[in-house]
Amino acid sequence: MNGLAAAFAIARKDLRTEWRTKESLNASVSFAIVILVLFSFAFDLDREERLAISGGLLWLVYAFAGALIVNRSFARELPNDCLDILIASPAPPWAVFIGKAAACFFLLLLVELISLPVFGLFYNIRWIGSFFSLLLVIALATWGITVVGTAFSAVTVNVRLRELMLPVLLYPLLIPLLIGAMELTTGLLNGNAVLSDIRLLIVFDVVYTSLAIMLIEFILVI
Amino acid sequence: MVAASADRVWKYFGDYPALRGATIEVRQGACVALIGRNGAGKTTLLRILASLSKPSKGEVTLLGLSTRSPEARRRIGYLGHGIGVYDDLSAFENLTLFGQLAGVSDPKEAANKALERVGLIRVKEGLAREFSRGMRQRLAIARAFLHDPDLLLLDEPFTSLDDRAIAVLQELLAAARARGSTIVMSTHQLREAMELATDVALLERGRMVFAGPSTPEMVLDPGWLYRTYGEQQA
């Protein structure tokens, strides 16, 4: 079996088990919607202020919701020692990693697409007109979050306090990605985005995906 | 031909050496009972052979290949302490997934055959978490034998199995041996192990103090090995 087919099988397995248990999806969707709704009541902002904070607010919510998703990525393999069976299988370690990152990507993308209309409704911001540009930014930044998050999920899988350790390790590395995504999103919602800034997201994704693929065997087999 | 070899293997956990220069050579077709007291290093050695852990020092090869080579991993079957199946997948989904990962040409057919062999075909659509303990153990056994591996690495395979699972495992082990597969199993059940084993390896505090063919003395009196080569003799 080639690596891509193994990655696809692992991603499908993760999505199937998540769909049956909804253990991280429910928590992540609830968190994103509650934070967006609470913030809309907590601050009395005019339209310009709302537009100015829109990108920052969205990406903070997505980053925290993403941590809830990626936290379960490798932890899902712990019951019954399933991680051992994945590592001992002929599937290349990079395929295991890519499969898990892809499953997290689709789950977080789903959370984001569910919470986007809630954001538009409660903040009275129209995003439909720039939906496809916004989707590109969301997809690139979400891949960055899930790649770094899945790698650290593997690093912390055997750590007792992994739910606390993961955000501590994850967020500092995500700072450049989140700043780029926040600026692009705010620009798109204001109608003055410079899409060439998307290069930062592309470079981040390429660098961290390559690093994770190169290092994952050393992380998993100790 | 050598199916598995560990040459002066050391493994440290922090400062503690779980293995201290353990050496073993397993010839193809052999059935090796890896015995030793709790903490002797049996699980550590099996995990290194199964490519789940790297030795701190020493060389390990499987079927003449590096333990981390995909070809070596394709040819091993591993049954560890955990059952290694997903609770939220059905028995059939579990085995199809592992068949795909093991590179089996028709994973669905292999899954059906394996479920038939362990007597779970009628409940193949049931989720693993809904199974009884004995059924889960049989599913784990089916998973380890699914791809007809050339080398089986079994960590205390008979521990806490029910009678039916023991019968299934013995049947599959006999079939594997008839096929020419090599078996390395750690165990505390000396009498059962001696009946199956062609070779015996005794680990004491991380050192391999005996490795060789099983003899009539061992079969008649499993404690003989400990008394002859065990710690008090060192």
Image: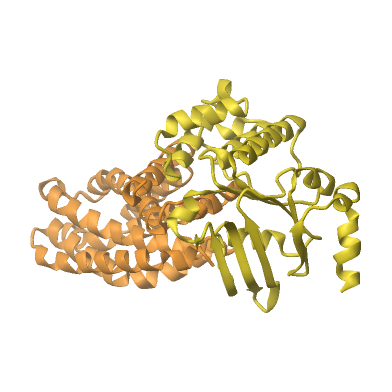
Chain colours: A orange, B yellow
Compared to residue B138, the image places residue A170 above or below, namely below
Q: Position of residue B187 (x, y in %)?
A: 76, 51
Extreme residue toward the front, this view? B1
Q: Observer-nearest residue: A108 or A3?
A: A3
Q: Quadrant of residue A187?
A: bottom left
Q: Quadrant of residue A101?
A: bottom left
Q: Position of residue B225 (x, y in %)?
A: 86, 59
Pick the quarter of the image with the N terminus of chain B. Answer: bottom right
Q: Is residue A194 visible?
A: no
Compared to residue B47, the image places residue A27 above or below, namely above
Q: Is residue B26 left or right of residue B115?
A: right
Q: Is residue A131 visible?
A: yes
Pick the quarter of the image with the C terminus of chain B. Answer: bottom right
Compared to residue A210, the image places residue B126 above or below, namely above
Seen at 63% across and 37% down, the residue is B178
Seen at 46% across and 39% down, the residue is B99
Seen at 41% across and 49% down, the residue is A28
Q: Position of residue A118 (x, y in %)?
A: 28, 45
Q: How many numbered discs, if any?
A: 0
Q: Observer-nearest residue: A98 or A48?
A: A98
Q: Observer-nearest residue: A148 or B150?
A: B150
Q: Position of residue B126 (x, y in %)?
A: 55, 27
Seen at 64% across and 57% down, the residue is B26
Extreme residue toward the bottom, this view? B15
Q: Is residue B130 left or right of residue B228?
A: left
Compared to residue A166, the image places residue A89 above or below, namely above
Q: Is residue B116 left or right of residue B171?
A: left
Q: Is residue B220 left or right of residue A126?
A: right
